[in-house]
Image (cartoon, helix red, strand yellow):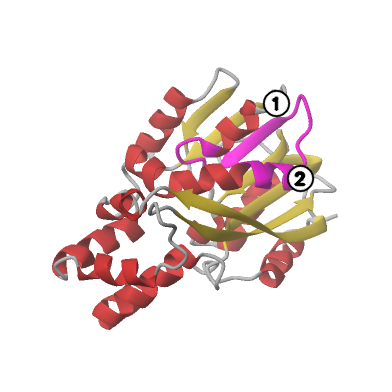
Amino acid sequence: MSYSDPEGYEAFMGRWSARLAPLFLRFAGLEDGQHILDVGCGTGVLARAALADGRTIRITGVDPVESFIAFARRASSSRAEFQVGSVEALPFPDGVFDATLGLLVLQEFAEPDRSIGEMVRVTRPFGRVAACQWDFRGGMPMMAMFWEAATALAPDEVAGYQAKARPLRNADLEEFSRRWMKAGLSNVRTAHLEFRMPFRSFEEFWLPFRSSATPFSAFAAQLDRESGGELERLYRKKLQNIRSDGSFELSARALVVSGQRNSMDGRG
């Protein structure tokens, strides 16, 4: 399956994205009056975060999923506009945006160099190109515990699912730096962005796992049904530091990279 349920996404991964977005924006270093392109904008999480701090920026968001674009339009202000489109072939002329950003989209790139090249192409000279994704190599305990539990139940199914991962899913900061420099960007910077996500109860945390808002949650929901709820029970046992009232927190870490376009062809 593919992404198709914006409300479900908001309840599942959107709550994590909303915590990460302000950290990413501070790293990217936006300025008043800029026109920003948000690639893979999804439900408009980044746009809402950028407009919430009062700066007079404008946001254009592009995403291939029509239902997500419709949701983003309803949830954002008049200073944001959204349209359907693919990052592999962005529907914009060269050099028209002051900065091009991608929040949690790198792991979705089927052709990373082509997609990054498109982000560079539509960015003006000396503009910024920045993106981030979760650190899937140990920075997301929420997912690590899931895969441990799922592998204990259905190792073959897990291996099949993970074999479909995109090229950058397990990338590190060094690879992102190389990709950005290969695209002709200069002043390349990388960093880790970290925060903690609170939950009032396990039920609040687990409920979105029963949806099919993303390929990940759809896989989780199917496996939990097929195991008679055993996946949920195994996951609950793995959680530590649960308070007496049932609340708990999980850490999260994202990888972020930024670079500057110095000329119209992006080659310095």
Magenta-tinted stretch: 22-45
Assign the N terminus to one quadrant of the image: bottom left
Q: How many numbered marks have been drawn onto this rendered protein structure?
A: 2
Where does the image place residue 210, in percent across and percent down from the top left?
A: 25, 53
Neighbourhood count class around disc 2 (C-alpha, 10 Å): few under 14, some 14–19, many 20 upward = many
Q: Residue at x 77, y 63 (%)?
A: 181
Assign the C terminus to one quadrant of the image: bottom right
Q: Which residue is mark 1?
A: 57
Q: Which residue is mark 2?
A: 128
Where does the image place residue 251, in percent across and percent down from the top left?
A: 55, 60
Q: Secondary structure at mark 2?
A: strand
Would residue 127 appear left or right of 93 to someone viewing this image?
Answer: right
Task: Choose between 224 and 247: the one closer to the eye.
Answer: 247
Q: Residue at x 77, y 49 (%)?
A: 265
Q: Indicate the quadrant where residue 232 lies.
A: bottom left
- Assess whether residue 35 is covered by the magenta stretch: yes
Q: Residue at x 41, y 47 (%)?
A: 200
- Assess whether residue 243 is covered by the magenta stretch: no
Indicate the amino acid at tag 1.
Ile
Indicate the amino acid at tag 2.
Arg
Q: Is residue 160 visible?
A: no
Q: Indicate the quadrant where residue 114 lies.
A: bottom right
Neighbourhood count class around disc 1 (C-alpha, 10 Å): few under 14, some 14–19, many 20 upward = some
Residues at marks 2 and 1, CA–CA distance in whole angstroms? 14 Å
- Against 79, is 118 above or below? below
Nearer the observer, disc 2 or disc 1?
1
